[in-house]
Amino acid sequence: MSNNLSIKNGIVIPEHELEITTSKSSGAGGQHVNKTESRITIRWNAKNTQALPEDLKTILLKNLENKLTLEGDLVVSNSETRSQVQNKENALLKLTFEIKKALYVPKVRMKTKVPKRAIEKRLKFKKLHGEIKKMRSKKFDY
């Protein structure tokens, strides 16, 4: 089974760049927890990766600067289930999601001008509303 990680638009992180380790999981599970290494930890060095072009790498490093170690590793771990295989799949999905989120570039907002007609309509409505409120407060002398 190939562990190459497909991100988006043809970007693939090769298996040899991912360091996958197992360890004993904490939490509930009884004797099973003490016997098996079901926790999965994946390390991926974002600084030294060959999978990304330089422009995408700078965007990624900027967006992930708080989640990277001093060496430039992105560390993701998973121990949600008792199954090592499921935890590995979940950790890979989590890593993919983090990288996709970091590579997302929002669209630049185009400024638009409010039409003159709309401004006039709004001001006319405000004037009318003000007149109605003025009529409510009139005091009549008898």
Image: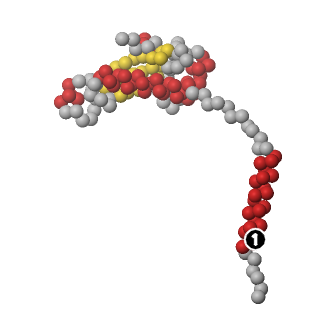
Residue at (80%, 47%) from the top-left corner?
Answer: 117
Is residue 54 at all visible to an observer of this figure? yes
Residue at (76%, 54%) from the top-left corner?
Answer: 122
Query: Residue 142 vs residue 29: left or right?
Result: right
Residue marked by disc 1: 134
Q: Residue furthest left?
A: 31
The amino acid type, in three-letter code, at marker 1 is Lys
At label 1, counting other C-alpha atoms closer than 10 Å, the crowd grade (few under 14, some 14-19, many 20 or more) is: few
Q: Which residue lies furthest to the front in this view?
A: 142
Does residue 34 lie above or below 122 as drawn? above
Does residue 56 lie above or below 116 as drawn? above
Image coloring type: secondary structure
Q: Please provide percent x and percent y for residue 9.
A: 55, 17
Q: What element carries label 1?
A: helix
Residue 86 or 60: which is nearer the viewer?
Answer: 86
Residue 121 or 18: which is nearer the viewer?
Answer: 121
Q: Please provide percent x and percent y for residue 128.
A: 77, 62
> In the picture, which quadrant includes the C terminus?
bottom right
Residue 91 or 47: which is nearer the viewer?
Answer: 91
Q: Residue 31: name its quadrant.
A: top left
Is residue 64 at all visible to an observer of this figure? no
Does residue 30 lie above or below 17 as drawn? below
Residue at (40%, 14%) from the top-left corner?
Answer: 3
Residue at (75%, 59%) from the top-left corner?
Answer: 126
Q: Residue 87: name its quadrant.
A: top left
Q: Please provide percent x and percent y for residue 13.
A: 48, 15
Query: Residue 30 vs residue 124: left or right?
Result: left
Query: Residue 118 vs residue 28: left or right?
Result: right
> In the picture, which quadrant includes the N terminus?
top left
Q: Please provide percent x and percent y for residue 94.
A: 43, 27
